[in-house]
Every structure is written in structure tokens, then in C-alpha cells.
Image (cartoon, helix red, strand yellow):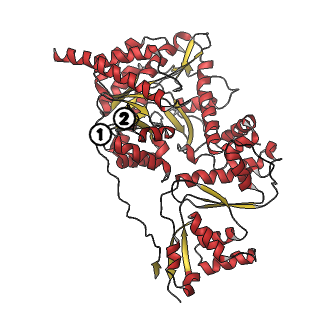
Amino acid sequence: MLLDLFDAAPPTADDFYSAAFLAALLKPNRETPTLVSGSAGKAAVKRFNVYRNNVTVSLIDALAAVYPAVQRITGVEFFRAMARFHIRETPPSSPLLFEYGRDFPAFIERYEYAQGMPWLADTARIERAWLDAYHAADAPTLGAAALASTPAERIEDLVLTPQPAARLVRSRYAAVTIFAANRGSEPVEAIDASQAEDALITRPEFDVVVRRLAPGHAEFLSTLWAGRPLGQAAAAALEAHPDFEIGMGLATLIESGACASAQLGDPS
Amino acid sequence: MMRDVTANPEREASEPRFPAHPIAGLAGTSFKPQHLKAILAGAKPLGFLEVHAENYMGAGGPPHRALEAVRRDHPLSLHGVCMSIGAPQALDKAHLARFADLVRRYEPALVSEHLAWSTHDRVFYNDLLPLPYTEATLRAVSDHIEEVQEAIGRPLLLENPSTYVLFRESTMSETDFIRAIAARTGCGLLLDVNNVFVSATNHGFSPLVYLADFPLGAVGEIHLAGHAEQSDDEGEPLLIDSHDRPVSDAVWKLFEKVIERAGPTPTLIEWDSEIPEWPRLAAEAAAAQDILERAGAVWMRAHAA
């Protein structure tokens, strides 16, 4: 059952017009509020419906702009119906629409008609991370020189800070492949969705890059980003995946621009 | 003790400062990212560019790079869409702070917002919703505008709305309401001529009478846009402020009359959906520029006499 956040508190004298206007705005079955009219005794049913339509359509469009791959996968009609349910349950709480839809992946996970696409929510999480990376603060990325200038015996003590745009999305499904295949307009070939995939999303300069990580790299990066030194991050990655190679891990980290800076603690 | 071994230490964040490009008497267009290439390539004609403030309220990334690039070479108009000045509730302080930050960062030639509301009880409705015109709403809107002007340290231009309904409780006309706001707050006005035409058609009044009543002396910017046509419950035209097509002939004619009376005023072609290729948008702005010069000359002669 859907919560209905559009059921506003009872109007007070001071906010009567906005509360009364909204009481009917997102409820197509409600009558046109009596506080509005057309001119010279004209009715206001179609007139009020212009506002209803503007609000609903513009918010569905906002979700479609954040989640183009999800829309391509589900088809426009399915997407718009799903989005309509979501905006009624979780309308935007900020005027910044590029922030909207943060709860949409979790909604997709629960959405009755999307149960046959268990990988759809993670595909949406990658799209949400893509837009967050796009708008993230500008910051330098860690270059190979920072590692090269560190004495070999101290490398494991390096603490790396994440680049503001960098994000990880871990999926039990082939969400990275599905995302990549559906962000463009080229035909999509059959994908084995059952393969677990980890996505690293970065924006080293101006372009957002989504890459699929090799096994162990997600543990490596998430441990680093939690503020643990490089040696501990490598150990965590090896524990999860004995094949993990720290050289590959560092190469991916530098190439992707996943980190902003490196610090070396004094030996204790 | 931690030692920074980053090879490329964080560059000093230097505040970008921009040239003060004059905007007087120019026509301009909405700035859309898909036109950035054409604009950077020096496509002509071009006067000023206007952006929706909210699209540049992210922390960083490509939107700010694009805006910095166009701001360097062109006058900029910053147009807020979501301040919800017409709501009875208090303004969103965080949003106001973000708006003021953009004004400081980009030093726009013009700063404007709408006589409308969009937020209630922390829910954002993403539309420019209408308000009744009463003594109570006049007080609330005036307080909100003073708060915005305090935050940005300069006058705001307030835009007249296009509306589809009237409020039974309204006790004054829209032009009386707007004139009183300008007088109380010292704000300027953004006259959207398409909005005048849309509302006039929807509510059965004469756009010429509205314009005769409008305090043109306070107008610092004009908007022109296209509208769509539907029908109301009685089967008569109901115009929708859609910003998705060229400016209508009727609106061009009203615009020319406004310029003859008000003199050359920065004028924007707004086009926000079904966005055309740059040359088509630029041609609309060139048509506005022609009228600014032709009707502006009429105004000059009248004022020289």
C-alpha cells in the first residue's frame, strides 16, 4: 500500500489557498477546489487540470531524465506508470530536480510489476550515481607520481581520500553491462543478467566514466575510502578474492581517478 | 602527523571574476547546453544568455564549466524558477543561500524570479502555481522579496505569471498587485509579454489594457515565448505557457507597442522544451533585436521631442 504524502495537514487561515489548491492537485478524482474559477462565471475543471498535468508530467519527466536506461529497458509506458506511483509516494523535497529520485531504485525493488527484472534497481543505482558524479565538486585526481614518490616500504601506510565524484555500486546482477547497453540507442544484445558486477563511477575531468571492476577491486576501494591504509585495503581485497593483485588495483585506482589525494602517516 | 604526498596538490580555488558586459537594449536567448558548441564557436547574432538558476546549483562539474565559458564572453541573466516567493510559508533558507551564492559567483547583469509558488510543507511541486491577490498575500510576497533582495544585495526583477484560474478571494487586479509590490519593495519587474497574452486570453481581458496599467517604468527585462492552445470547459481557447515553439504574431505586436512606450529593454526569447537548433533560436532573438531597434527609435524620437 502506498503512503500518501500529498495528504497535507489541515489548512490554517494563513496558508488556506496553497493547502486547498494542493488538496486536489495530485488527486485526479478530487473535485476542482472551490477557491478557484474561470472568469465571468466560467468553470475551472479543465483549467485546474492544466496544473495537475504540469506537476505530474514534469516530475515524471524529471525521473525519466535521471533514469534513461531504466526507461529504455521498461519502455516508456511502463516507466511512466511506475514513475507516477513513485512521485505520489515520494514527491521531491528539494527544488533541485537533479537531486530527485534518490529513493527510486528502492521503489523499483518493491514495485510489483518490476519483480521480473530483479537487476533493474541496481541499473537505476548506477544511473543515480552517474548523475551525482556529474554534479559532484571539482577536485584533482591522484596521479601515479604520488605513489612513485613514496618509498616502497611505506606504500602500505598510504591513506587515500576519495575523489568527490567517485562512487561504487555493487550488484548481484550484471548491472554494469545492462547499464552500458541501455544508456545509448544502439541495439542491445542478449545479456546474462545473473553475473554479479561491481561498478566504479568516476569523473576524472568533465566526463563521467562507469567501469566494471575486476573481483576484489570493490573491497579494495571501499576499504581505502573508509580511511584505512593501503596495506589493509589490499588485505581485505585478498580475503574476498585470493586472485586480487594489488598492482592491478592501484593501476585501476590511478587510471579511473577514484582518489583525490594521498597522505602518509608517520611510522608508529 | 600526516604528510601530503599528492603530486598535484589542490590548486588554489580562485574566485572567477568576469567582465561587466553591458546588456542594455539587447535581445538574448535561453542558454541550453546543446547550444554550447555553437555559442563558443562565435555564432551570431547573440546578445545575452539567460539560465535557470537551479540548473547550476550543483557543487561542480560540466554545468559550471559551461556557464563560466559563456559568462566570460556574454552578458548573463540569472532566472530563478523555484524560490516559491508567492507561497504563504517562509522561504527555504538553504535555497536562498544557494541563489545568493550564484549571484556572487557569476555576477549576472540581471536577476529575476516569479510571482508564483511551488513549495508547500517541504514538498516541491515543480510548477509555477498561482496565488490570490489580497492584502495578506501582498504582505507575504513583499516580505519574501525583501528577504531575497537582502540576501543578494541588489534588486530582484519579479515576473508576472501566466495563469489558468482566478481566485474568488482576490481583491485587487494583478497589475495593482504588482505595482504595489514594486512600490513597497523597490524591486524591478520582468514583463513577460507572452504571459500577458496567455492570461488575457484565458481570463477574457484585453492585453492592451493590462499593459497600459502595468508599471512599465519598473521593467528591467522582457520575456517572449511561444504558447500552445487547448480549450476550456466552455470550449473557448485556453492558452498554455509552453515555451516550446516560436513567439506568436500577436505577442510580437504587443512587444513592439511595449518597446515604443518603454524604450529598448533587454528582451529574452524563452524556449525550454522541443528546443530547436541554434540558428532557429538565434533567428527569433534577431527578430526581437530588430524590433528593439525599430520601436526603440520611435521611443527615442518621442523622448527627444
The residue sitting at the left extreme is B305
User: Residue A19 occupies which quadrant of the picture?
Assistant: top right
Quarter that holds the C terminus of chain B: top left
Q: Which mark is residue A261?
A: none
Q: Chain of mark 1?
A: B
Please state the horizontal and vertical placement of residue B16, each as a whole percent of the image.
35, 53
Above or below: residue B269 compared with residue A157: above
Q: Residues within 10 Å of mark 1 (few under 14, many from 20)?
A: some
Asked if the residue under mark 2 is in contact with the one under mark 1, i.e. CB atoms within 8 Å, the reply is: yes
Q: Residues within 10 Å of mark 2 (few under 14, many from 20)?
A: many
Above or below: residue B234 compared with residue A17: above
User: Residue B294 occupies which quadrant of the picture?
Assistant: top left
Q: Which sits in the foreground, B33 or A103?
A: B33
Q: Are both tags, 1 and 2, on one chain?
A: yes
Above or below: residue B50 compared with residue A153: above
Q: Which mark is residue B21?
A: 1
Q: Chain of mark 2?
A: B
Name the residue that disc number 2 marks: B48
Which amino acid lies under the numbered mark 2 shown in the image of this protein? Phe
**Which type of secondary structure does the marked residue at label 2 adopt?**
strand
Which amino acid lies under the numbered mark 1 shown in the image of this protein? His
Please state the horizontal and vertical placement of residue A240, each as a whole percent of the image.
74, 74
